[in-house]
Image (spheres, rainbow, N blue to C red):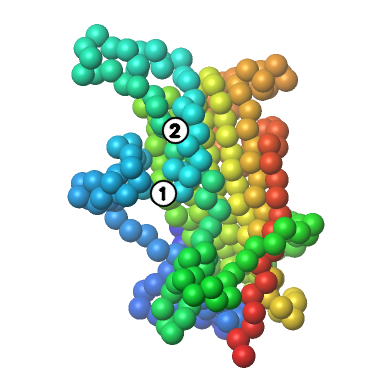
Amino acid sequence: METVVDKEILKSSGAELLPDGRRGLRIHDWEIETLRGTILTSLAVEEWEEKLKTSHLPEMVFAGWKQEGLPPVEVPAAAQWKFRSKPSQQVILDYDYTFTTPYCGSEVVEKDNEAVEAKANPKGEATLQWDNCEDQIDLAALSLKEPILFYDEVVLYEDELADNGVSLLTVKVRVMPSSWFLLLRFWLRVDGVLMRLRETRMHYTFGKDETPTVLRENCWREATFQSLSAKGYPVDLAVWSDPSSISQRLPVIKHTTQKLKIPRKV
């Protein structure tokens, strides 16, 4: 839900709301905006199925899931899905039905007032580049009490996995007088089988460095219900409904930190 902020607080922070009813604000040479679209039409679904070479899509398409091609996760009901009494009703799990995605954000560069995807710059010109680093996002600074100038959460896709769990991709953004922070979270729970949490955090502090630098942390956590039970954790599904409160119970599979240096405009 979007935050309503006093105009005086915005002004004293050097921020202003975006015009024309757009969700977001301008602050210190940054324009931060969230967008919401409608669910795909049947025609659009067919077009994306053709582009992605698949006939399996969540209700809201997000293409990054196709990059890894992970094998399907077996669930207790898998045998019933695969082999039913009628051949026409058989379900063969030959794709990642959990819609797990490695997506951690996209970058574009503006040239002649036209946005061009940074990775696909056709002329080999300067592009945005994330470099591995040892820096960490300052979580202590993020916990300081200061006004929230803007906050919003957008659900990118959600699937109940045929009543066998949840697959959810969301993005949250908040802007404070000192910085902005973004959390992109993929949360997967296959009931009785597996939990997977992939989070991308981005943070930028206003006016901190001569060269503007965005930090990005990627963390992948995952565990089976069996391994968690062996550690003494409860297996009641109600305990595993909120990824924010249980992330520390899931072991880290992979963690990386990168930084993006943004050249100042001349």
Look at the picture and state if 212 lies above or below 73: below
Q: Amino acid at mark 2?
A: Asp
Q: Residue at x 71, y 78 (%)?
A: 211
Q: Residue at x 64, y 79 (%)?
A: 263
Q: Is residue 25 among what the camera can see?
A: no
| Tag of residue 224 | none
Q: What residue does disc 1 label? A: 63
Q: Amino acid at mark 1?
A: Ala
Q: Residue at x 62, y 90 (%)?
A: 266
Front-most of residues 82 and 200: 82
Q: Is residue 263 among what the camera can see?
A: yes
Left or right: where 117 falls relative to 233: left
In which image quadrant can residue 258 be found? bottom right
| Tag of residue 96 | 2
Residue that extends furthest to the bottom in the rendered view of this protein: 266
Whichever of callouts 1 and 2 sits on the residue coming sooner in the sequence is: 1
Q: Residue at x 24, y 46 (%)?
A: 46
In what element is the residue under mark 1?
helix
Q: Position of residue 215 (x, y in %)?
A: 68, 62
Q: Residues within 10 Å of mark 2 (few under 14, many from 20)?
A: some
Look at the picture and state if 218 lies above or below 28: above
CA distance separating discs 1 and 2: 13 Å
Front-most of residues 119 and 108: 119
Residue that extends furthest to the front in the rendered view of this protein: 123
Look at the picture and state if 167 lies above or below 77: below
